[in-house]
Image (spheres, coloured by chain):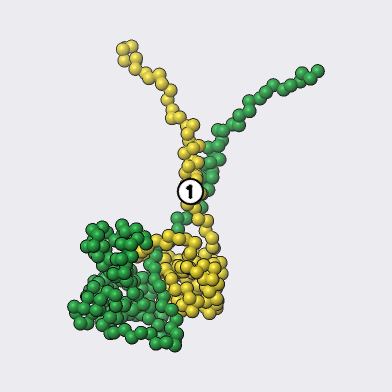
Chain colours: A yellow, B green
């Protein structure tokens, strides 16, 4: 009987955990660096469209966003399609050109990223585009997801 | 008398809770992170026309794509499927003067896009995607022929890339919206 008992390894079992904080810190730093804290509170609902031939915007600081979609009302209800720039909903469409002109003065290579809900109608986008043309911000980008 | 010296305590800080703190922070950032979609279809809007007349464009060098309120795509007034837009644009741009109804050269070819106020946005994007796809294919093809490497592998702003881009300039124009 005792013949079968001899092979019990005497090494300690258990994974050394002393390096765990280092690993965790590395992950932590990775996420801290990649995180972009959401800078605006969205007041419109946006469900992006998908497209295949898309490009990445490399220089994020050039980008200014315009959000277009149905307004979020309380209780998950959705209202009329509205335009949001920064933190405010736009009531007067003609005001867009002034806002955009000011932004263009600060950043001459401004790219306007249009984040539009997929079910919108194009009329409101035409209006925004006309305003952008008046402001002189001609580089735009229609935000889309990559088609899978 | 002055013998009251305290026994020296161990000066190490207990590091065992470090991992816990780091974990908490990690979880916070994991939750907060939104990996932003910053991809999209780039376009340059035409400037507001001054009183100066725009230079005349010959009919054959202009391809009119209209997306109407029903989400139908019309190429030069002919209804066509979204899936065929890519092929049409390719033929039009890469005609090099062969067919008298299509463009004279890729340099002259202009794709003009018109929409209605009630055009569904996703149809418009699908159509634009196809147009971009056509240019992407042409550039890819040119790059393979000239340098033997795919266009996407050419570095941003490099001489070769610019050369290919100039061969097939993306001349996509947004037509003036109708009044009212």
Identified at 19% across, 79% down, the residue is: B99
Residue positioned most to the top: A2
Residue B37: in sight, yes or no? Answer: no
Frontmost residue, B44 versus A143: B44
Q: How many marks?
A: 1
How many C-alpha atoms fall within 10 Å of the one at disc 1: few (<14), some, or many (≥20)?
many
Instruction: Judge from the rendering whether residue B13 lies leftward or rightward of residue A123; answer left or right.
Output: right
Say which chain tag 1 marks: A
x and y, in percent, of residue B74 in the image: 29, 80
Residue positioned most to the front: B159
Quarter in which the N terminus of chain B is drawn: top right
Residue B96: in sight, yes or no? Answer: yes
Identified at 39% across, 61% down, the residue is: A56
Identified at 54% across, 38% down, the residue is: B20
Residue B122 position (above or below residue B30): below
Quarter in which the C terminus of chain B is drawn: bottom left
Residue B54 position (above or below residue B90): below
Residue B97 position (above or below residue A12): below
Instruction: Judge from the rendering whether residue B82 lies leftward or rightward of residue B27; answer left or right.
Output: left
x and y, in percent, of residue B103 in the image: 25, 79
Task: Return the residue at label 1.
Answer: A31
Identified at 38% across, 78% down, the residue is: B174
Frontmost residue, B130 versus B111: B111
- Residue A6, quarter of the rendered image: top left
Frontmost residue, B17 versus A111: A111
Residue positioned most to the right: B1
Frontmost residue, B112 versus A8: B112
x and y, in percent, of residue A143 in the image: 42, 66
Say which element carries label 1: helix
- Residue B166, quarter of the rendered image: bottom left
């Amino acid at each position: 009987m005792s013949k079968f008992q001899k092979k019990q390894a005497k090494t300690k079992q258990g994974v050394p955990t002393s390096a765990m904080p280092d690993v965790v810190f590395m992950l932590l730093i990775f996420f801290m660096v990649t995180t972009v804290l959401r800078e605006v509170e969205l007041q419109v609902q946006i469900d992006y469209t998908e497209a295949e031939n898309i490009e990445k915007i490399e220089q994020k600081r050039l980008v200014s966003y315009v959000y277009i979609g149905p307004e979020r009302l309380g209780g998950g209800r959705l209202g009329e399609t509205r335009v949001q720039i920064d933190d405010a909903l736009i009531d007067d469409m003609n005001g867009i050109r002034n806002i955009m002109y000011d932004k263009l003065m600060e950043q001459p290579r401004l790219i306007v990223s249009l984040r539009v809900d997929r079910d919108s109608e194009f009329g409101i986008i035409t209006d925004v585009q006309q305003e952008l043309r008046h402001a002189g911000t001609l580089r735009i980008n229609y935000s889309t997801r990559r088609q899978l | 008398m002055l013998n009251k010296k305290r026994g020296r305590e161990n000066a190490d800080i207990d590091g065992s809770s470090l991992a816990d703190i780091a974990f908490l922070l990690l979880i916070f950032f994991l939750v907060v992170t939104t990996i932003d979609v910053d991809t999209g279809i780039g376009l340059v809007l035409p400037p507001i026309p001054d009183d100066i007349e725009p230079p005349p464009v010959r009919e054959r060098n202009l391809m009119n794509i209209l997306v109407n309120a029903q989400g139908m795509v019309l190429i030069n007034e002919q209804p066509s499927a979204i899936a065929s837009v890519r092929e049409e644009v390719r033929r039009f741009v890469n005609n090099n003067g062969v067919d008298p109804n299509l463009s004279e050269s890729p340099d002259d070819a202009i794709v003009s896009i018109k929409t209605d106020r009630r055009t569904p946005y996703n149809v418009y994007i699908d159509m634009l995607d196809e147009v971009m796809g056509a240019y992407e294919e042409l550039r890819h093809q040119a790059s393979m022929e000239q340098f033997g490497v795919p266009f996407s592998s050419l570095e941003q702003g490099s001489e070769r890339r610019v050369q290919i881009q100039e061969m097939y300039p993306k001349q996509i124009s947004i037509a003036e919206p109708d009044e009212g």
